Image (spheres, rainbow, N blue to C red):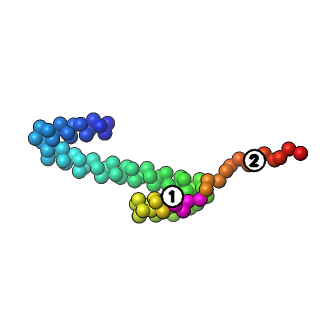
Amino acid sequence: MLTMLLSQIASQIAQGEWFIGLAFLFILLPIVWFIIAILLCIWVYRDAESRGMNGVLWLIIVLIAGIIGLIIYLVVRKEKKSLAQPPPPPP
């Protein structure tokens, strides 16, 4: 769908209707950026919760700080907890 929209914008620009293509671009880019930011925040929340960290805190940090908050989270996040215990050694 995105490639179809971009090809439509390119054809409008080629036909001399560059202002319509530019308007679509200025509308499309913030929407795509917002969708990516929301998906990223959902991932950070779920990942932090699965690692035993405070998911809401990290969600707020990534919302406020953006890419810098994501980098900080990736650096300081804990190792994932293993749910399965290794079997006991044989007697």
> On the picture, is 65 further left or further right than 14?
right
Q: Residues within 10 Å of mark 2 (few under 14, many from 20)?
A: few
Residue visible at 52% across and 61% down?
75
Quarter containing the N terminus: top left
Q: Is residue 23 above or below residue 6?
A: below
Residue visible at 89% across and 45% down?
91
> Where in the figure is residue 73, as x and y percent of width and height?
50, 60
| Residue placed under numbered mark 1 in the picture | 74
Q: Which of marks 1 and 2 precedes in the sequence?
A: 1
> Where in the figure is residue 15, as x and y percent of width and height?
12, 37
| Tag 2–tag 1 contact (CB < 8 Å) | no
6 and 76: which one is in front? 76
| Mark 2 residue type | Pro
> On the picture, is 83 further left or further right than 26?
right
Secondary element under disc 2, as helix, strand or loop, is loop
- Label 2 – label 1 distance at C-alpha: 27 Å
> Where in the figure is residue 74, as x and y percent of width and height?
51, 58
Residue visible at 23% across and 37% down?
7
**Residue interval drawn in magenta:** 73-78
> Where in the figure is residue 64, as x and y percent of width and height?
41, 64
Q: Is residue 11 above or below residue 28?
A: above
Asked if one can make out residue 60 in the rendered structure from this viewpoint, the answer is: no
Asked if one can make out residue 52 in the rendered structure from this viewpoint, the answer is: yes
25 and 73: which one is in front? 73
Residue visible at 49% across and 51% down?
43
Query: Looking at this rendering, what residue extends furthest in the left direction?
Result: 16
| Residue placed under numbered mark 2 in the picture | 86
| Mark 1 residue type | Leu
Secondary element under disc 1, as helix, strand or loop, is helix
